[in-house]
Image (cartoon, rainbow, N blue to C red):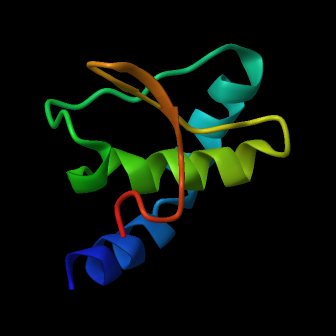
Amino acid sequence: RYVAEFGAHLAAQGDAVAETAAAARAAPTALLCYEADPGRCHRTFVARAVAAAAGAEAAVVHLVGEGAIPDAPGIGA
């Protein structure tokens, strides 16, 4: 339910996503949150929306205590 409701909210944030995508195209960009686990955080969905809006060169990478892991469909689902 959370994923569906947050997805609906995020879909209504087109201007904010476009602005963040423009920043991501201009320079490496990080989204930060207190939640350490990307599978339990809203930033995963925001990062995916921004990457999609930024274009083919944008990639989501999660920075975690062990280093960095590429985004995968099972994260945040």
Mark yes or no: residue 7 visible.
Answer: yes
Residue 32 in percent (x, y) is at: 31, 26
Residue 24 quadrant: top right
Q: Is residue 44 left or right of residue 50?
A: left
User: Residue sitting at 81 percent across and 45 percent down?
Assistant: 55
- The total of numbered circles placed on residues is 0
Residue at the left extreme? 34
Residue 45 in percent (x, y) is at: 43, 57
Foreground residue among 16 and 59: 59
User: Residue sitting at 21 percent across and 76 percent down?
Assistant: 2
Foreground residue among 52 and 65: 65
Mark yes or no: residue 12 visible.
Answer: no
Quadrant containing the N terminus is bottom left
User: Residue sitting at 30 percent across and 75 percent down?
Assistant: 3
User: Residue sitting at 75 percent across and 27 percent down?
Assistant: 25
Quadrant containing the C terminus is bottom left
Examine the rendered structure and indicate whether residue 37 appears above or below residue 6. above
